[in-house]
Image (tube, helix red, strand yellow):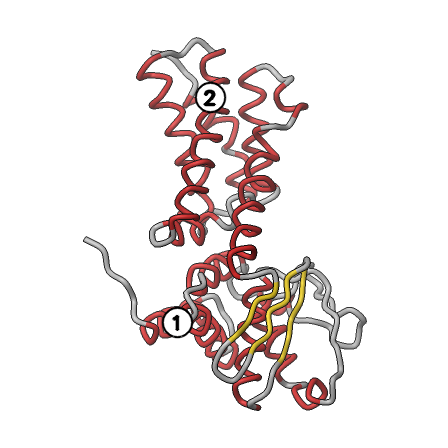
Amino acid sequence: MSYRLTLAEAESYLRKAARARGLDWGIAEEAGKAARWLAAFDLPGPETMLAHLQQLPAGEYRQFIPDCSLEPWQAPGGLLCPVIAGAALADRSMQMLDRHCFRLAATAYPLLLAATVGQAARCHRTVFTTAWAGVRVSCFENGLSIEGNRDDLLRQLLSHWTHELTEVVTENPDLLALEPKSRLIKAMEMVHDYELTRYEMAIRQWALRDKGAARAAKKVNRIRLDFFRSALSELGFASDDLEMRAMLFVCYHSWEAPMFPEIPRKRRRELIAERIELLTSKG
């Protein structure tokens, strides 16, 4: 049985999720509206917003607030929060109406930034444009346009997920040169240290309703399974035993962070070697 949320339900759930992560009510409202706005144009707004919220340390979102006195804007925590930065831009709508251009440092999920700015465009009945990595999203009162086309944007997202968050491990020559158990440990340390599962939930949810995303998810599953099958085969596993262990590796390490956010990162890293010892033991 499947259930598709209405736009109003998606907005409500994302607003509550943002509040649960410690965002102020005003910012939480913006998060819900941005997710709904993207979903209305058949873009993965709720999925992307949920993935972003999961990456925000609970109650510590202020480290992602931009220092607007800098050029470009920057945040103490590194990546700018697209909702908070978007709200700050909306507060400067009059300057944007005077054609002032604001520059931002690296921003998480820039599509969400475009959506937040889109709310300001609707309010002022004008056009505001955000641009990043060769993509331009122009937001109107009742619509948007994507230069490079929507499909190009979505393909960029999927390509980034496949290469930068999967193949960066599975095709790493330094990893492949290690003996199998060390290879598995180092691979999982990379997944943990660089938060390579940070888009997992968003992409998987998107894949349930988009054929292109579903194909990308299937490809990534194959790449990850092949990586683990190779190491496990070298350790002497075969047949159903090998397949079962490979699937356990993929499932656990893809979902540990979003599934168990209450476990401290330090503790999760400490358990990597012990968990791999368990998953590779015989008898």
Q: Residue at x 43, y 48 (%)?
A: 213
Residue 7 shows up from this direction: yes
Choose the circle earlier in sequence order: 1 or 2: 1
Q: Quadrant of residue 19?
A: bottom left
- Check if mark 1's residue and mark 2's residue have beta carbons within 8 Å: no
Label 1 CA crowd tier, 10 Å (few <14, some 14–19, many 20+): some
**Label 1: element kind:** helix
Per the rendering, the mark at residue 277 is 2
Marks 1 and 2, how far apart in space? 40 Å
Q: Residue at x 61, y 35 (%)?
A: 168
Q: Is residue 242 above or below residue 76?
A: above
Q: Is residue 149 above or below residue 29?
A: above
The image shows residue 85 at horizontal and vertical percentages of: 63, 73
Front position among marks 1 and 2: 1
Label 2 CA crowd tier, 10 Å (few <14, some 14–19, many 20+): some
Q: Residue at x 64, y 28 (%)?
A: 172
Q: Residue at x 60, y 28 (%)?
A: 171
Amino acid type of the residue that numbered disc 1 sits on in the rendered structure = Lys
Amino acid type of the residue that numbered disc 2 sits on in the rendered structure = Glu
In terms of depth relative to the viewer, which is nearer, 71 or 190? 71
Figure disc tally: 2
In the rendered image, which residue does mark 1 sit on? 16
Of all residues shown, which one is farthest toward the top?
236
